[in-house]
Amino acid sequence: GAGVSQSPRYKVAKRGQDVALRCDPISGHVSLFWYQQALGQGPEFLTYFQNEAQLDKSGLPSDRFFAERPEGSVSTLKIQRTQQEDSAVYLCASSLAGATDTQYFGPGTRLTVL
Amino acid sequence: GDSVTQMEGPVTLSEEAFLTINCTYTATGYPSLFWYVQYPGEGLQLLLKATKADDKGSNKGFEATYRKETTSFHLEKGSVQVSDSAVYFCALKKRGGANSKLTFGKGITLSVRP
């Protein structure tokens, strides 16, 4: 595919369940970002990878949030013991390399925690 | 910390009307500035960008000029179309370093009536 893909597109979880959200970046893109978008708000940065290295995780809201990109391509965002406040759209973006490159966004995963 | 402030919405216009969406920012140094658009049911797309003071970004009839003296990056279009109905986000990105995360405003919904 040509763009960033994310799966699942929608996820409903009961409070306390663990969830895993997947991001397939554009092939060859070195940088990968995760953002969280609450209803009616702009996206907020969660974490950043350059290849397999997680260079910044300052935006992760708690230690229940964990992200990985073991082979420098596909990335997974895991949320343990989900809470209602975790309900949001989770966006993944990738860019070719470097600080000036355009970030291309996936369609997002809408997580609803009941 | 860095922040982006967008005018309150939503905005409803008739087709062919003139559009201005205000955006101001707070950041140390000289960030790059962006407008992203999210059409209904789609992911975020880059609309235009400017990387230094007095630069003008333009695309699809939209324009925005990087104004360092007023720390602004207002989006304008001379004649809107129904197909421009979407959510518009202003964003900044710091230059340099390994982290090139985007900081977004809250977004504004534009509806264009036929």
Image (cartoon, helix red, strand yellow):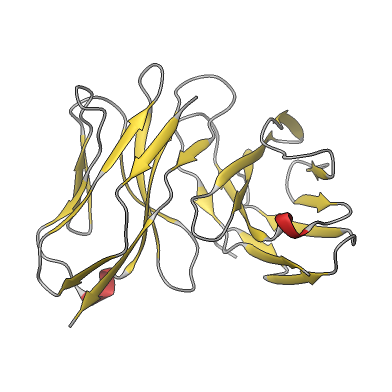
| Front position in the image: B2 or A22 | B2
Location of the C terminus of chain B by quadrant is bottom left
Q: Is residue B55 left or right of residue A104?
A: left
Query: Hey, which residue is sitting farthest top in the picture?
Result: B29
Q: Look at 9% across and 59% down and name the residue there.
A: B78
- A8, above or below A28, in the image: below
Q: Is residue A28 left or right of residue A74?
A: left
Q: Look at 76% across and 36% down and name the residue there.
A: A52
Q: Look at 71% across and 55% down and name the residue there.
A: A85
Residue B16's spot in the image, x, y percent? 10, 71
| Front position in the image: B40 or A29 | B40
- Asked if residue A26 can be seen in this view, the reply is no
Q: Look at 40% across and 68% down and name the residue there.
A: B39
| Front position in the image: A17 or A4 | A17
Q: Is residue B20 left or right of residue A69?
A: left
- Asked if residue B10 can be seen in this view, the reply is yes
- B74, above or below A53, in the image: below
Q: Is residue A83 left or right of residue B87?
A: right
Q: How many marks?
A: 0
Say which quarter of the image contains residue A90.
Answer: bottom right
- A38, above or below B69, in the image: below
Residue B76's spot in the image, x, y percent? 17, 52
Say which quarter of the image contains residue A23.
Answer: bottom right
Residue A29's spot in the image, x, y percent? 60, 43
Residue A6's spot in the image, x, y percent? 67, 62
